[in-house]
Amino acid sequence: MRRYLCIHGHFYQPPRENPWLETIEVQDSAYPFHDWNERITSECYEPNAFSRILDSDGYISQLTNNYARISFNFGPTLLSWLERCSPNVYQALLDADKESRKRFDGHGSAVAQVYNHIIMPLANYRDKVTQIRWGIADFRSRFGRDPEGMWLAETAVDIETLSLLAEHGIRYTILSPYQASRVRMRPNGSWEDATGAKIDPTTPYVQSLPNGKKIALFFYDAPISQGIAFEGVLKRGEDFAQRLLGAFSTERDWPQIVHIATDGETYGHHHRFGDMALAYALQYIEDRADVQLTNYGQYLALHERLPEVEILERTAWSCAHGVGRWKEDCGCNTGRGGTHQKWRKPLRDALDWVRDRFISQSEKVAKGLLKDLWTARDRYIDVILNRSDETIQEFIAENATRPLSHDETGQVLKLMELQRHTQLMYTSCGWFFDEISGIETVQIMQYAERAIQIAEDLFGDTEASNGFQQRLAKAPSNDPDLVDGGRIYQEQVVPTRVSLKTVAAHHAAASMFQEMPDCDCPDPIDITEENPSEIDAYIVDREEYHQRSSGRSRTSWGRLKVASRLTYDSQTLTFACFHIGEQNLVGGVRLAEAEADCKLESQLKQAVARADVPRIIRLIQSAFPENQFSLRNLFRDEQRRILDRLLGQSLRSIEEMNRHTFHSFDPLIHFLTEQAVPVPAAFRAVADIVINAEIRTALKTQPEAEHIERLIDKASTWQTRLDRLGLAAELEDRIALAMQLLENSPTDGEAFDRLDSVIDLARGLPFEVNLTSVQNRYFQFLTRQRSLPGDAASGSSLKPEFSSLAEKLSLRVPQ
């Protein structure tokens, strides 16, 4: 009998975008990366797209796209982020599916996913339909084909979900063996109990459905999947391969498919170098004649007669209690002791209340605008995928009852955005962990808050926020200081709301720093022409802008038109802003009023001319009594950029003062070290500041190895705590720049020398510098050089220095 093997990776991150800005703000816990998507891409998604296979000497001999030889699904919201922020990885995924179609008889390895990872058995019928249709449409737009399979979030399943999958042309899904109830191996044979994972996972099964359709179900091998995730199987690629091959049995009389399913992040993020173990295992298996790599689509095409199965309803792979983990305190948690999850049920009840409250209100507003609200919602995925004016007009033409005005189109877009956020608020991660104040749970509350905000504007529903908070108050926190979900909502969710006035305030405050001259500039800045700029999901037009400087202070005022790119909302707003210096900034914003605006402008000009600081502040406070702002109101990334700039001079002053102390006491510290006397903590603190700053400065410029080596020696003497992650990231950026220069100018000797020197530096440092990216890029560079015809530096021989650098990077020169 033929033996087949399939590895499935479920690659997914919860959506992390600010629900108002539609972008991910800086996440300090991901340092030295901007956010966790960026970090996990570096640790997992990119390495698997360009994974390295080592030869017997430990040298990189081949780069391979792991995705092309496994089965994989990526969450649509993650794919959207990759498309914008990591296009090379995104393209590698598309290429992998194309390559897998050639490899597996026309069956691509990419698998679709329900759109934003909601627990399908806990969703109502309409939401299930939308999740499936959005997931299929997203997949089709990216991979250029219809999906054969669909991943269910947490493999959570019920018969209604399977029936809907089959109705939408989905041929299979993947489940845990613990989700099988009973099996029948032959037609009209007897049913056998399969509970407790007694099902044989080496064949797919077929589930008959109430709608007369059928769907194939693959139950993955749980012990091997568990071993990969938690038992160190990925330490050696050959061990991984042998563990897979060991699951075949000569006692079975059917073609066997050994297949596993794990979180894709296992291969690199959870287990470092897991991508390389996967690449080696795939090659090891592919080189054997007695086993064939496959994917689920190809296997089904080759084996149509399948035994029957009946599932256990409302079960999932990560909850031993069905789907309790996403609706109650079932006992499932992440293992942190002393916590309860009594908050889960009140949270779900509160979200269900929000969803259900807006159904009738949405249907009432949609009447007369849309042919059918729910059909329009399902088709809105086209707009989500491409928010161009052309796509929006096509959506309106297809779904509206008649031609709509600009304002009516805005109403429809608000309806759709409300529905989108009521989908996003059910993302499963909000219940998975142990505490209601966790970032994942706060995130889904923010999605609910965005829906509530739209409902206030669209329906005049001013009670939804209070009702939501009251219901969240029944969700107790594990932290006595936070009390309950209601308190968390009020303190951590409501303040994150963004309005058009908030965007105007952000623009006004940020512009004070973006246009700050390097020296005092008394010349006024007056801008009246249109100059639209984008602030994430918003567009800001300056209809009028004035700025005056006096010493260190600056005053600006004017009129802005702010519009949402998503809902067509817009307002014309008046602002005034006064920056006294450092973090001291006061400002205000309100709806534009011609007469009041003229009066304010006249008064501000007079106060600025007299440099009357108290008068300027009083004018702003009295003109904007309800909508004042400061640097606290800036969106996080811009706030961080400005604070870094403001702190820069102060930090340089502190560094200079500490540098004097450092050099003054350097001989004494050397003496203490020679006598094995611990360096006093106060001196170590000085060295922490000075040495890290000097190394970072050296790395930002053209690094000189000898200078940095001296600094590293000083760090050892002074017992300094080096910022290893930050310094490594600095050098990695420098290496990437040097590699880019060489790629652009392969014959430039200086470009090569620059790269060679920073690689030497990286190899000699007492902390690890991640060379994965430059190794991959240099390997590809050498491959291209080999393929160039008629060049002395290419063809059958490479420049000696090229080969020398390959040796330093542990690369086997491509033949």
Image (cartoon, helix red, strand yellow):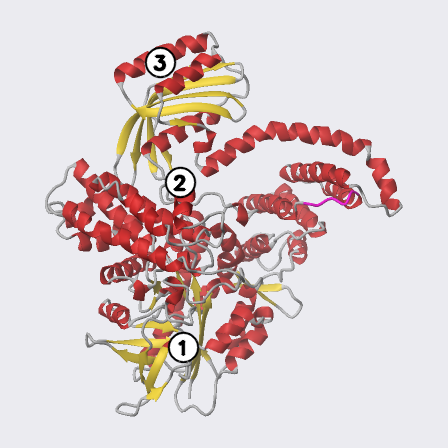
- Res. 734 image quadrant: top right
Q: CA distance from mark 3 to mark 2?
A: 31 Å
* Residue matched to label 2: 496
User: In what element is the residue under mark 1?
Assistant: helix
User: In what element is the residue under mark 2?
Assistant: helix
Q: Is residue 250 left or right of residue 763?
A: left
The answer to whether residue 582 is seen in the rendering is yes
Amino acid at circle 3: Glu
Amino acid at circle 2: Thr
Q: Is residue 784 left or right of residue 531?
A: right
* Residue matched to label 3: 601
Most common secondary structure along the magenta stretch: loop
Start-end of magenta stretch = 718-722
Image quadrant occupied by the C terminus: bottom right
Estimate how packed mark 3 is, as few (under 14), some (14 to 19) or many (20 or more) residues with alpha carbons within 10 Å. Answer: some
Which of the two labelled residues, at mark 1 and mark 2, occupies the earlier sequence position? Answer: 1
Estimate how packed mark 1 is, as few (under 14), some (14 to 19) or many (20 or more) residues with alpha carbons within 10 Å. Answer: many
Amino acid at circle 1: Tyr
Point out residue 393 in the picture as x, y percentages from the top left corner: 20, 43
Q: Nearer the viewer, residue 53 or 507?
A: 507
Q: Is residue 216 positioned above or below 326 on the image?
A: below
